[in-house]
Image (cartoon, rainbow, N blue to C red):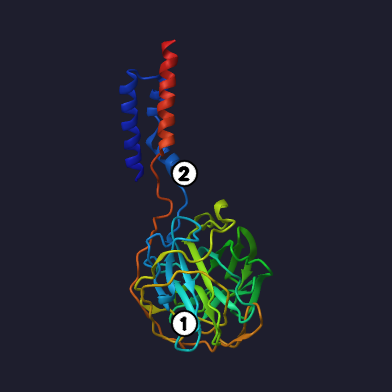
């Protein structure tokens, strides 16, 4: 609702109140005389922050995301969930193989054009839930940012057992943060990022929050590989290796915004203890074809639970590596090779819709505010009759 529409609604309300009360209290006259600009400013100031993109699966499918990789292993479930009524379940199996041998099941989000350009800033957050702890070996990547077309991984989160680490890749691989025992199974966790995009390591930086606590402050790094747009992928990724387990991760409430408030770095109070076991009923994972390349080391294990993926999700291209030169795994030190350049081709599928709204949009006065106004008018009328 625009500010003009809100002002019109206020005037209509005042007219109805005057008709009900049969008289015009002095306070009402003063309220009506408020300058329109001041009232509009008050309404705008009270508007809640809003993300520019949301991936919360409340659509019942994967249409909020740009693509899925091995999407037949992704489903929309009704339990556990952090907010709303749905979440996304990702299950990694030994046959979820990319053409270059990497084992991966992921969802891809590409910010709108220009939002990851030189000098821009991005806030991004998502919540995840592990029914069981991931394997200590091999390690698992659960989320990372990468360059389009050249497929250089720029930063990633990696889990081994219940330990988590965050590393930037350029100008050299650097573990910016690690925490042992932090990834508790059966509990929701939330990761938030603030990225200053730059090809210059002295200008680029990253801030990280884990479960509402800031764990990296202005970690310097080259955050842009080149002039290409950059994207993020969330899910489960392992380097080529045979395994017998079938880990599961549940994702919910992924958001991109312009401020930290937009992306809500802390878990809601209701989400601290998690909910139920993994799985639950759910619909399959949409028809998102194509695949944006992926990167480097990662691996995981653990996850019991139910819920199978319907939908399709195929993609071309070899998976990505972690940039120029060999770089080490963030947590374990196992090498994840990277030759840089264009060792991956990519054919993206159709872009899906998103449940987003423009940040800072004014909102209409709520029922409580209107009820309070009517009550105040009634009280004034009663005082006038004494």
Q: Is residue 200 visible?
A: no
Circle 1 crowding by C-alpha within 10 Å: few under 14, some 14–19, many from 20: some
Q: Position of residue 140 (x, y in %)?
A: 58, 77
Q: Secondary structure at mark 2?
A: helix
Query: Split into 4 quadrants, where in the image is the C terminus?
Result: top left
Q: Quadrant of residue 36?
A: top left
Q: Which sits in the foreground, 169 or 103?
A: 103
Q: Which sits in the foreground, 361 or 76?
A: 76
Q: Quadrant of residue 166?
A: bottom right
Residue 213 vertical position relative to residue 89 in the rendered view, above or below: above
Q: Secondary structure at mark 1?
A: loop
The residue under the point 60% across, 62% down is 209
Structural distance between the alpha carbons of marks 1 and 2: 48 Å
Residue 54 vertical position relative to residue 202 in the rendered view, above or below: above
The residue under the point 41% across, 19% down is 26
Q: Position of residue 104 (x, y in %)?
A: 49, 80
Contact between labelled residues 2 and 1, with CB atoms less than 8 Å apart: no
The residue under the point 43% across, 35% down is 369
Tell me the tag on residue 45: 2
Q: Position of residue 18 (x, y in %)?
A: 33, 23
Q: Which sits in the foreground, 350 or 37?
A: 350
Mark 1 or mark 2: which comes first in sequence? Answer: 2
Tell me the tag on residue 182: none
Q: Is residue 184 visible?
A: yes
Q: Which sits in the foreground, 258 or 142?
A: 142
Q: Position of residue 47 (x, y in %)?
A: 45, 46
Of marks 1 and 2, the one in the foreground: 1
Q: Quadrant of residue 315?
A: bottom left
Q: Which residue is mark 1?
A: 96
């Amino acid at each position: 609702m625009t500010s003009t529409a809100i002002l019109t609604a206020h005037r209509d309300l005042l007219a109805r109140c005057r008709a009900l009360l049969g008289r015009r209290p002095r306070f009402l006259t003063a309220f009506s005389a408020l300058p329109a600009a001041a009232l509009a400013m008050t309404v705008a100031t009270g508007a809640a922050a809003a993300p520019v993109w949301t991936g919360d699966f409340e659509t019942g499918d994967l249409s909020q995301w740009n693509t899925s990789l091995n999407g037949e292993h992704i489903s929309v479930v009704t339990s556990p969930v952090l907010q709303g009524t749905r979440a996304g379940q990702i299950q990694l199996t030994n046959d979820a193989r990319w053409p270059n041998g990497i084992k991966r099941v992921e969802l891809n989000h590409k910010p709108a054009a220009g939002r990851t350009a030189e000098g821009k800033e991005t806030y991004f957050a998502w919540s995840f839930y592990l029914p069981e702890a991931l394997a200590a070996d091999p390690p698992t990547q659960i989320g990372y940012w990468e360059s389009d077309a050249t497929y250089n991984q720029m930063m990633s989160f990696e889990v081994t057992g219940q330990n988590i680490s965050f590393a930037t890749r350029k100008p050299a691989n650097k573990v910016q943060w690690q925490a042992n025992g932090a990834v508790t199974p059966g509990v929701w966790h939330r990761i938030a990022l603030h990225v200053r995009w730059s090809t210059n390591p002295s200008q680029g930086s990253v801030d990280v929050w884990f479960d509402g606590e800031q764990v990296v402050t202005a970690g310097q790094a080259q955050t842009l590989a080149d002039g290409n747009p950059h994207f993020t992928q969330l899910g489960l990724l392992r380097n080529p290796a045979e395994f017998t387990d079938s880990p599961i991760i549940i994702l919910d409430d992924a958001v991109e915004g312009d401020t930290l408030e937009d992306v809500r770095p802390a878990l809601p109070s209701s989400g601290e203890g998690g909910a139920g076991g993994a799985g639950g009923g759910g619909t399959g994972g949409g028809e998102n074809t194509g695949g944006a390349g992926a990167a480097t080391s990662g691996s995981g294990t653990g996850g019991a639970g139910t819920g199978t993926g319907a939908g399709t999700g195929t993609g071309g291209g070899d998976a990505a590596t972690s940039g120029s030169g060999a770089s080490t795994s963030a947590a374990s030190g196992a090498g994840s090779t990277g030759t840089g350049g264009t060792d991956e081709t990519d054919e993206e599928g159709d872009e899906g819709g998103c449940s987003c709204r423009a940040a800072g949009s004014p909102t209409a006065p709520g029922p409580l505010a209107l009820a309070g106004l009517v009550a105040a008018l009634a009280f004034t009328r009663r005082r006038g009759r004494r």
